[in-house]
Amino acid sequence: GSSGSSGLVRGGWLWRQSSILRRWKRNWFALWLDGTLGYYHDETAQDEEDRVVIHFNVRDIKVGQECQDVQPPEGRSRDGLLTVNLREGSRLHLCAETRDDAIAWKTALMEANSTPAPAGATVPSGPSSG
């Protein structure tokens, strides 16, 4: 088991489409208790590539066939696609192994979006917009 309070809500491998080159890359994704989603080179979650604030920042999440404007990774079914639309205007294009997996991620992310962070967790508070 892992020591300490890592505060991991959900972790797993997802494909991520880079916003610039539109290339798909496999990353280990970790949804943390403080409402952030980080992605990493592997499941040790040591080498963080980036982190996205999910808490109160998600407009909507599309799954599978709803993701019209996205081409899934080579040899992958469209059923596993996930598009996370953030309030700040950016999008995350992800692809899970299966449709069930995609739906499970959607559920976890929607919960993280609406759940108040536990006491002691630090959520970066920017200027409120909208």
Image (tube, rainbow, N blue to C red):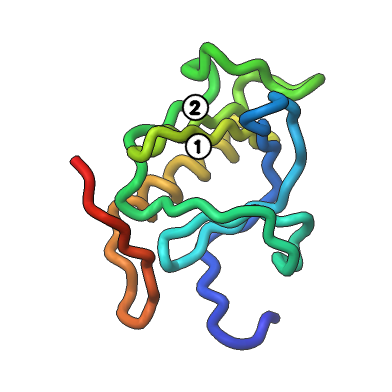
The residue drawn where x is 76% and y is 37% is 25
Quadrant for the N terminus in the image: bottom right
Q: Counting other residues with Cα less than 10 Å from the Cα at mark 2, is it few (<14), some (14-19), or many (20 or more)?
A: many
From this view, report whether residue 111 is shown above or below residue 44: above
* Amino acid on which disc 1 is placed: Ile
Q: Alpha-carbon neighbours of circle 1 within 10 Å: few (<14), some, or many (≥20)?
A: many
Q: Horizontal placement of 32 versus 118: left or right?
A: right
- Residue positioned 50% across, 64% down in the render: 32
For residue 44, the mark is none
Which residue in the protein does label 2 denote?
63
Which quadrant, please, contains the C terminus? Answer: top left
Nearer to me, 97 or 46: 46
Extreme front residue here? 127
Tell me how far mark 1 sits from mark 2, CA to CA. 7 Å
If you read the primary sequence from the N terminus, does the residue marked by circle 1 or circle 2 appear first? 2
Which residue is under mark 1? 103
Element on which disc 1 rests: helix
Nearer to us in this view, 72 or 49: 49
Give the image quarter of residue 38: bottom right
